[in-house]
Amino acid sequence: MAINKLTESEQAKTENTGFGSNAASYGGRFLNHDGTPNIEKKGIGFFARVSWFHSMLSISGWRFFLIILFFYIFVNLLFTLVYYFIGVEHLIGLKTTSESEKLMEAFFFSTQTYTTVGYGRISPSGFLMNAVSSFHALIGLLSFAVATGLMYGRFSLPKAFIKFAENAVIAPYKEGSALMIRLTPYKNTTLTDAETKLTLVIMTDENGKTTNQFFTLSLELPSINALTLSWTVVHPITQESPLYNFTKEDFSSSKGEIIVFVKAFDDKFSNTVIARTSYTFQEIIYGSKYVPMFYRDNEKDTTILDLDKLSETEPAKLPDIN
């Protein structure tokens, strides 16, 4: 089987990956398709192992705004109850009779105090009510400072804005074949000095023990000056490749993963941005190639980059493996 060929590629083998070699200790893939590690941490408390700053910067936009809205409503409902139990008669200007109206007015007074708006229609009286409203205003100032910082952090956070094709392919290449992975920038960014590294992870049996072996895959073009269109990263499958003589059946029956790291410089962020993903062997299409995704417009003076075709492939005949 082709797996036995791995021992002949020791010059490409690497241990400097940050992942463990004991396959029995790992469950599933190393990286999720979105580039996040497939790891769940335990052993310490939940609040000790979670960085709220990183979490608030990395969650989706709708979740971020939902958390801000929930916190805003929760804090004001809490202080509404405090004002209500202190006694709404200590709120000067309140002209209501029913309990529901008192609660509603106390809530709106709470929101006005929290945001430091203070329309002036209702004002606190008495030491306890003034003390609580002063503390409430302080919490509002601090929480809005934190929310503003998080908003700016999310807005200014350097991001790669790179999409990867859903599947890698084994496609014809010169006289043989190659592993190909396509990626492209999808926003109006300018990326320069882009570099890509591919690491092959495959489970092998050594003396009855299943281990993870890591191989750095050589690339036809490991770096480019500018990433403006799509970039098809190519690993030629030559005799020196760990994938040499791998058949379609080998890919479907073996447990392996291709880890992809992309690094580029964004001149607008003036910072290096990073994107990563991975493809299991089952996410590699054998005997296929990518459909071209950019072309000239009708006037022939502009290049069109069709992002809808990033993952589009078509069958391709590979040379026979001897």
Image (cartoon, rainbow, N blue to C red):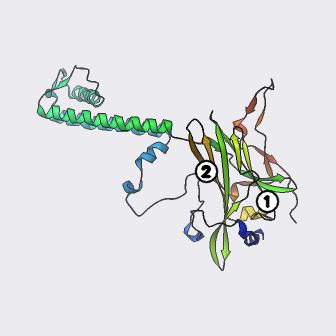
Task: Look at the numbered disc 1 and give the secondary structure of its residue.
Answer: loop
Closest to the observer, 225 or 177: 225
Q: Is residue 226 above or below residue 99?
A: below
Image location (x, y in percent) of residue 112: 28, 27
Q: Residue at the spot x=82%, y=56% of the render?
A: 177
Check disc 1 and report the residue beneath it.
237
Residue at 74 percent of width and 55 percent of height? 219
Check disc 2 and give the amino acid type.
Answer: Arg
Report the residue marked by disc 2.
276
Q: How many marks?
A: 2
User: Which residue sits furthest bottom?
Assistant: 207
Q: Quadrant of residue 24?
A: bottom right
- The quadrant where residue 118 appears: top left
Rendered location of residue 68, percent (x, y): 39, 37
The residue positioned 58% from the left and 44% from the top of the image is 273
Report the residue at 41% width, 56% height from top: 49
Q: Amino acid at mark 1?
A: Ile
Q: Secondary structure at mark 2?
A: strand
Drawn side of residue 165 relative to residue 159, left or right = right
Instruction: Tell me whether the residue at label 2 lies in contact with that at label 1, contact meaning CB atoms closer than 8 angstroms.
Output: no
The quadrant in which the C terminus is found is: bottom right
Frontmost residue, 277 versus 69: 277
Percent from the top left, x then y, of residue 227? 69, 40
Query: On residue 179, which mark appears?
Result: none
